[in-house]
Amino acid sequence: MRKKVLIVEDERIIAEDIKSCLLNFDYEVLEIVSNGEDAIVSTALLKPDLILMDIKIEGSLDGIQTAKRILKSHDLPIVYLTANADEATVERAKETKPYGYLTKPFEEAELYATLQVAYYKYESEKALKKSEERFRTLIEENTDGIVVVDEKGIIRFVNTAAVILFEKEKVDLLFKKYGYPISNKAFTEIDILLNSGKKRIVESHVVETEWEGERAFLATLRDITKRKKAEEDLQNSNEKLRRLMEETVNGLMSAVEMRDPYTAGHQRRVAELATAIGDELRLNTDKLDGLRIAALIHDIGKIHVPSEILSKPGKLTDIEFTIMESHAQAGYDVLKSIDFPWPIAKTVLQHHEKMNGSSYPNGLFGEEIILEARILCVADVVEAMSSHRPYRPALGLDKAVEEITKNKGILYDPVIVDACVEVIKDKHFKFGQKTLN
């Protein structure tokens, strides 16, 4: 569409020359007026896209005063024409933010270039304003609180959600110190103390931005008070469940020790060593917890073994040994219906399996045996050889280390054996210690 121009010029010959040039540029000239009053009326009626305004015109209003009146009601670009661009006149004209000046006389090419630049600048600024308006609307309607803070930490903008979040009036927030950390691309949690004395926990995400032509920071604030409370309640609930599970495990462990008093403390000592090995293998905390629980009740199946077999001082007969071997399966049967967050029942079932498939209850090979059971197997052997039994005195840690080293890669997982030896020899593990040296 052709751009529509209003010419405000009291020298008719000059005005007609300008009109002729504009028509050559494919502009549409709406009208030529010679005074400010007519210019104001014509602008309202004809709605030009651009005004060429002579500064010195007929009537009580000069071009600058006329421009001020027009710009109060209309958003459009104005280019001034003047024969005398003195400093005082230019300073007055600046107040109306003109889109260009043309000093008479001027060339046709100069007129064309000035108009093109003026209109381009106007369209660019209009697009920017529209973008800023959309941006303001977007952040104003955002359900998260949004605060814009300048480099000095002064609040320059808050949306409605932020006002609600802080429980303050907008006037009490704007142009005040923000008071919370501002760091580009930072995710932090901040505590907002409300006038009521209550605390609100807020998740803050800060990004660098520009506000009204200046460097600033935009903080997006999300109220996470309810979420934090829910997390705290869940944690408390989990802790209660964990305590209940620990009490249950201790009860099961005590039941075994009542049946087999000669090995009292065996499961706890196996748990100590198994956990130390797991730690040496850099298992995560959750996996270590599962390993410890499994170790504490790994002999639960012995409640199904007659006490006379458990405490027999001499060598077991083949039948007695078969009954003793059944404790792994019995333990699994007791535990399999309990919904542990770890493979406790499976670990208990496999804790006597050997790497070469030579052991019970299912003759599993290598990595068919789960990691926890492989660790438990080594820890169980070391503790059993180190402790007194009804049928023999304690053999000591050195003998136990000799046994697992001799059968490394045959009966026992070599990586686990190396970790166990590291724990005992280099870190001076002793049963009954809570921590390693």
Image: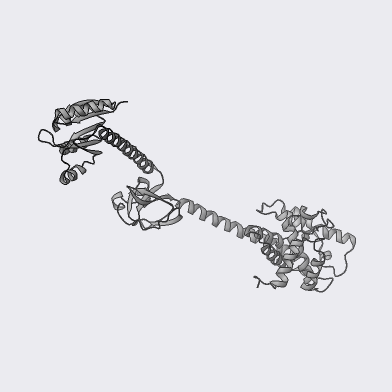
Q: Quadrant of residue 29?
A: top left
State which quarter of the image contains the C terminus. bottom right
Spot occupied by residue 270 in the image (x, y as percentages of width and height): 72, 66
Q: Is residue 151 above or below residue 80?
A: below
Which residue is depicted at the point 77% across and 68% down?
382
Q: Is residue 30 above or below residue 288?
A: above
Q: Is 294 situated left or right of 25 in this image? A: right
Spot occupied by residue 327 in the image (x, y as percentages of width and height): 79, 58
Spot occupied by residue 64 in the image (x, y as percentages of width and height): 17, 39
The outermost residue toward the right is: 318
Foreground: 94 or 103? Answer: 103
Q: Is 14 situated left or right of 22 in this image? A: left
Foreground: 168 or 85? Answer: 85
Q: Quadrant of residue 317?
A: bottom right
State which quarter of the image contains the N terminus. top left
The reply to whether residue 265 is in sight is no
The outermost residue toward the left is: 60
Q: Is residue 17 above or below residue 379?
A: above
Which residue is depicted at the point 67% across and 51% down?
339
The reply to whether residue 123 is in sight is yes
Q: Is 318 situated left or right of 376 in this image? A: right
Foreground: 264 or 55? Answer: 55
Q: Is residue 220 above or below residue 126?
A: below
Spot occupied by residue 263 in the image (x, y as percentages of width and height): 77, 68
